[in-house]
Image: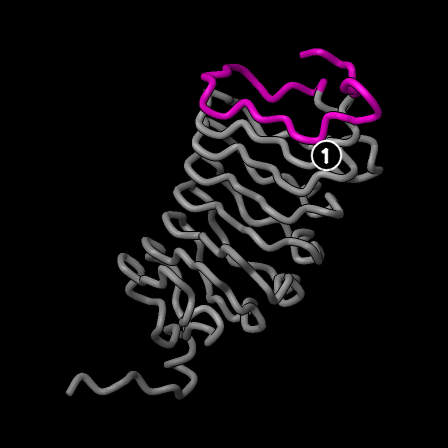
């Protein structure tokens, strides 16, 4: 990768797109030399290994990054906690990988975040309370095809435009109104969503009548 951040004239490299190129190996750390990059897209390639942890933090790597798209690759391991320290991140697109682990608590602090596209992975656990603070104007909330547990209650303030909640067999609880009216709203393969959780029923919340 050419490390020259400048382009002819007074411009800089702002977008790095290698989508559909068949690029292999692990994500190149040399990307950090391109400090003006707003979009880092390697979708539908052959990347492997863990997601890098060197973004965000002290702002030394991609300090103005807005879109991070590694969708449809072979990435493994967790979504790093450092993802929640990428201050301008708007679109996180990691669908169609082999990601595991729970969602970073720090991501709830990303005020600009509008796209959470993480469907078709192996992520698990529940969404931390910090997600009560996510951007209410959520363009994409696509979390289906994972092993998540718990409820969607921490997204109660979200008004999503698009939602993917399919194939979440371990989740339960009522659906926030702002998600129910999203485009693509579908609970196929998520039998517990839209119904009280077992502990809620045990606490006195009756199941709806089957009549």
163 sits left or right of 158 in the view: left
Choose top left, top right, bottom left or bottom right for residue 29.
top right
Q: Position of residue 179 (x, y in %)?
A: 45, 68
- Quadrant position of the C terminus in the picture: bottom left
How many residues crowd mark 1 within 10 Å: few (<14), some (14–19), many (20+)? Answer: many
Q: Nearer the viewer, residue 36 or 187?
A: 36
50 sits left or right of 152 in the view: right
201 sits left or right of 69 in the view: left
> Is 179 located above or below residue 120 in the figure?
below
Identify the residue at horizontal 62%, vertical 62% (top origin): 131
In the image, residue 7 lies in the stretch drawn in magenta: yes
> Is 174 located above or below residue 140 in the figure?
below
Q: Secondary structure at mark 1?
A: loop
Choose top left, top right, bottom left or bottom right for residue 148.
bottom left
Dominant secondary-structure state across the stretch colored magenta: loop
Identify the residue at horizontal 44%, vertical 52% (top origin): 143
Q: Which residue is mark 1?
A: 55
Q: Nearer the viewer, residue 53 or 6?
A: 6
Q: Position of residue 46 (x, y in %)?
A: 46, 20
Identify the residue at horizontal 42%, vertical 41% (top origin): 121
Q: Position of residue 88 (x, y in %)?
A: 73, 47
141 sits left or right of 207 in the view: right
Q: Position of residue 15 (x, y in %)?
A: 65, 30
In the image, residue 107 lies in the stretch drawn in magenta: no
> Is 43 located above or below residue 153 in the figure?
above
Which stretch did the figure color magenta? 1-30
Q: How is the image coloured?
A: one colour
- Quadrant position of the N terminus in the picture: top right
Q: Nearer the viewer, residue 208 or 143?
A: 143
> Is 42 located above or below residue 21 in the figure?
below
């Amino acid at each position: 990768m050419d490390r020259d951040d400048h382009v002819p004239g007074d411009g800089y490299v702002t977008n790095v797109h290698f989508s559909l190129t068949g690029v292999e190996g692990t994500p190149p750390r040399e990307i950090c030399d391109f400090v003006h990059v707003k979009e880092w897209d390697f979708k539908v390639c052959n990347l492997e290994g863990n997601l890098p942890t060197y973004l965000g933090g002290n702002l030394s790597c991609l300090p103005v990054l807005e879109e991070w798209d590694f969708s449809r690759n072979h990435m493994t391991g967790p979504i790093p906690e450092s993802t929640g320290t990428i201050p301008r991140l708007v679109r996180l697109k990691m669908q169609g990988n082999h990601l595991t682990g729970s969602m970073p608590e720090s991501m709830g602090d990303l005020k600009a975040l509008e796209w959470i596209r993480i469907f078709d992975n192996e992520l698990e656990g529940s969404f931390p309370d910090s997600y009560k603070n996510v951007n209410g104007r959520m363009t994409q909330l696509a979390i289906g095809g994972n092993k998540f547990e718990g409820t969607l209650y921490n997204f109660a303030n979200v008004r999503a435009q698009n939602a993917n909640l399919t194939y979440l067999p371990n989740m339960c609880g009522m659906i926030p109104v702002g998600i129910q009216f999203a485009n693509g709203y579908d609970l196929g393969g998520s039998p517990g969503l839209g119904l009280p959780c077992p502990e809620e029923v045990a606490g006195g919340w009756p199941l709806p009548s089957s009549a």
